[in-house]
Image (spheres, rainbow, N blue to C red):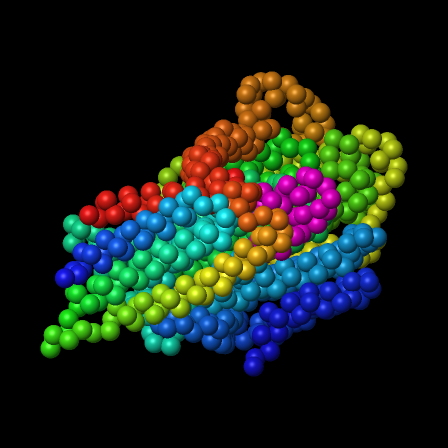
Amino acid sequence: MITLEHYLALSAMIFTLGLCGVMMRRNVILVLMSIEIMLNAANLALVAFNKHMIPAADGSVGPDGQVMVFFTIAVAAAEVAVALVIAMLLFRRLDTVSVDDVANLRW
Amino acid sequence: MGSSWLILFLPLLSACLILFTRKSKGLSAGISIAAVWAAFALAAQHLPAALEGGGTWAISESITWISAGEWTFTYGYMIDGLSLIMLLVVTGVGGLIHIYSLGYMQGDPGFSRFFACLSLFMYSMLGIVLSDNFFQIFIHWELVGVSSYLLIGFYYRKNSAAEASNKAFLTNRVGDFGFMIGILMLVFATKDMMPAGSGAGDFRAMAAVITQGGWLDQTAFSVGGGAWTLTNEAFLWIAGALTFMGVMGKSAQFPLHVWLPDAMEGPTPVSALIHAATMVAAGVFLLGRIFFVYLPSETALLIISCIGAFTAFFAATIATTQFDIKRILAFSTLSQLGYMVMAMGLGGVDVAMFHLTTHAFFKALLFLGAGAVIHAVHTNDIREMGGLIRKMPLTGWMFLIGTLALCGVPPLSGFWSKDGILHLTAHPPEYANNWLIIWLPTITAVLTSYYMFRLVFMTFFGKPADEHKYDHAHESPVTMWAPMAVLCVLAVIGGQLVGAPETLESFRAVTRPPGTPAYEPIHADSHTVLHALMIFGIGAGAAFIAFSRGWVKPAAVRKMLGPIPKLFDNRWYVDDIYEWIVAKIQQNVARACNAFDQYVIIGTIVNGSAWTTRAIGSVVARYQTGSVRAYALLFLAGVAALLAFSL
C-alpha cells in the first residue's frame, strides 16, 4: 500500500536533489534543469495531496490538485523560455555559461 | 446705472489707459487730470441736493459681487453728506495737486508712471470714501496701502525710498490686521440680526442692528455653559478698539505713526496729496463712517480720544527740533491728525470732518510750498535756506498764509476748525474729562505756532545760509504756483465758507451721523478770538525771539532744558525702541526658530532619516555579492526560517 507519506518522501527527496543542483552546479543550464526538478517535486506533492486529502462529498476525488499542476507546468514552460533566452544571451555576450563568472551585478 | 459709478471708475480707467500712453507724457498727464476733475464735477453736482436734504440725504447703488451660501458680498457706492464732503476734498485737492505735479515732475523719467500711480491712488481712495460695506472698504483700504507703497517708493533706485515704502506698508499691515479682526467680529456679531437681502457688513443695516433696543445687552458668546459671558456691548468696544487699529495705521496715530515721517521720501506732490490731505485722513473719515460702532461704548471713545490727544502733543514736540522741511510738515500732519482723531473720540464727528477739510487745504498748500522751495534750492535742510522770500515772493507769502491758517489765526480757515476742536476739549464729555484731553491740545496749539514759525523764519527770512543755493533759487512755473494760489484762497476763506453760522449748520447736519451728541459751535466772539490770538502769540513770539531776532540763542535754551530736546531730536526714541525690538527680540526669536529648523527639522528628522537609511543600506549592501548561488543559499535560509517560524 502506497500512502501519502511515500509520495511526500519521494517529493522531498526530488526537491532536495533539485535544491542541491541549484546550489552546487555552476552551469546555468544545469541550474535551470535543477529548478525544473524542484518544480516537479512540488507537482508530485500537489497531485498526491489531491488524491489523498480532498475527497468530494460522495467520496470521489475532485480535480483541484491536478488543475494546479497544469498551471504550474504552463508557468514553468514560460519561465524556461525566458530563462533559456537569458542563458543564450549570457553565452553570446560573456562567452560563458558559468553562473560564478556572472557576478558583476553587485554593490 | 447712476453716473456716480463713474466717480469711482474714471480714475481706474485712467490708470489702465496710461499703461498704453506711457510714451506720450502730455497724454498721460492729461488723461489723469481729466479723470480726477471729471470725478470732482460728478461729485459736486450732488452738493445742492445734499445741503438741502441735510442729514437724511443719501444716494446709493450696489451690485452683488459674490454670493456664497448664506453670505452675500456687495460692491457699491453710498454718497451721503459725510462722503460727499470727503469726495470733494479728495478730488478737489487731488486735482490741484495733479496739476502741480505737471510742473514738479517735469523732466522726470517716470513721469507717466507717476500719473498712473496717482490715478490708481485716486481710485483706491474714492473706493474708501464711497464704500457702503466693511468688506469693500477693507479692500480699498489695502489698495490705498499699495498705491501709497508705489508712490513712496517712486524713486525706487534710492535705497532710503525703498526702505521707507516697505516701512509704511508693513506698519500699515500691523494696523490692518487689527482692523480685519475687528471687521470680522462686528460682522459675525450682527450677522443673525441683519435684514434679509442686505450684503455682508453693510453699514446702514449694521447700524440699524446696533442701535435697535436690547441688542447691546444680549450675549455675544459665553464660555463654559454661561460661567463667563460677554455681552454685545463689551464685544462691541473690543471690536471697535481693534477696528481703530486700522485707523491708527492709516492715520499714523501713536504708536503706529513711525511710517509717516519716513514716507516723505516720496515726491513732494505725493507727500501733499497722500501723506497730508487725503490718505492719512482716511482713518479719520473711517471713524466718522462707522461711528455707530463707537457710539454705544464710551471705553472705545476714551481710548480714541486719548490716543489722538497724545499723538497731537507728541508729534508737535518732535516737530520743534527737526531740520528737514518736509519732516517738520510731516510731524505737523501727525499732530493735526491727532486733533481730528481726538475730536472723533469726543463725539465731534462734524468738527473733526471740518478740521479735516481745512487741514487738507492749508497742509496741501504748505507741502506744495515746501516742494517749490525744494525744487528751487535742491535741499530739504532748512539750515541751508534763509531769506528765500526775496527770491520767491509768491511761494513765500502763500506759505506764510498757510502757516497762519495752520496756527489758527482768525479769520483764516484753521481758526474755525481748530478752535472748534479746542472748544470741544475745554468742555469734554463726562467719560473723557481728564487732564490729557483738557491740557494737551492747548499746549499743542502753542507748539504748533512755535515750530511753524521757526520753519518760516529759517526758510524765508533772515540772511541766506548758503549763498550759492540762494543765488540759484527762482520762482516756480505757473503750473506749480497756480494750484497753490487756489489752495491759498481756500485756506483763507474755507473756514468762513463753512464756519459762517448758516452754512456751518448745514455742514454739521450733513456730516454728523444720527445719534451723535451735538456740541456747541464756536462763535467768532472777542473771547474766542483773543484766546486763539494768545495761543498764536506765545508760540510765534517765542519763534520770533529765537529764530528771527536771535535775542535768545536756541543752543542756550537747549542746554537749559537738559535731556528734553534730545528726546525730541530722537523722536522720543520710538523708532529706536522698534529697532531694538526688531533687532533683539524679533531677531532672536527668528534665530531660535531658524536653529530649530536647521537642527531639529532638517538635521534630525529630514537628514536623520536619510542618514539612517544610508547606514542600513551600506551594511545590507554587502550581502549583494552578485553570486547567484549565494542568493539561492540566502533564499533557502529565508524559507527555512519562515517555515521554522510558522511551524
Residue B99 visible? The answer is yes
Query: What residue lies at 34% left-to-right and 76% top-to-bottom?
Result: B196
Quarter where residue B530 is shown = top right
Q: Is B378 or B383 nearer to us in this picture?
A: B378
B568 up-or-down from A104: above or below? above
- Left or right position of B639 against B5: left
Which stretch did the figure color magenta?
Answer: B144-169
Image location of residue B210, percent across then percent down:
32, 63
Q: Is A71 or A22 nearer to us in this picture?
A: A22
Residue B54 visible? The answer is no
Query: What residue lies at 77% left-to-right and 54% top-to-bottom?
Result: B110
Residue lying furthest bottom: B1
Q: Is B520 or B490 nearer to us in this picture?
A: B490
Quarter where residue B31 is shown = bottom right
Image location of residue B116, percent across then percent down:
71, 61
Image location of residue B547, percent across then percent down:
70, 29
Query: What residue lies at 54% left-to-right and 57% top-to-bottom?
Result: A86
Q: Main secondary structure of the magenta part?
A: helix
What quarter of the picture does the N terminus of chain A occupy? bottom left
Please tell me whether residue B239 belongs to the stretch shown in magenta. no
Image location of residue B455, percent across then percent down:
69, 36
Q: Is A57 or B167 nearer to us in this picture?
A: A57
Query: What residue lies at 81% left-to-right and 39% top-to-bottom?
Result: B377
What is the number of callouts on the image?
A: 0
B451 up-or-down from A51: above or below? above
B458 up-or-down from B354: above or below? above
Residue lying furthest front: A1
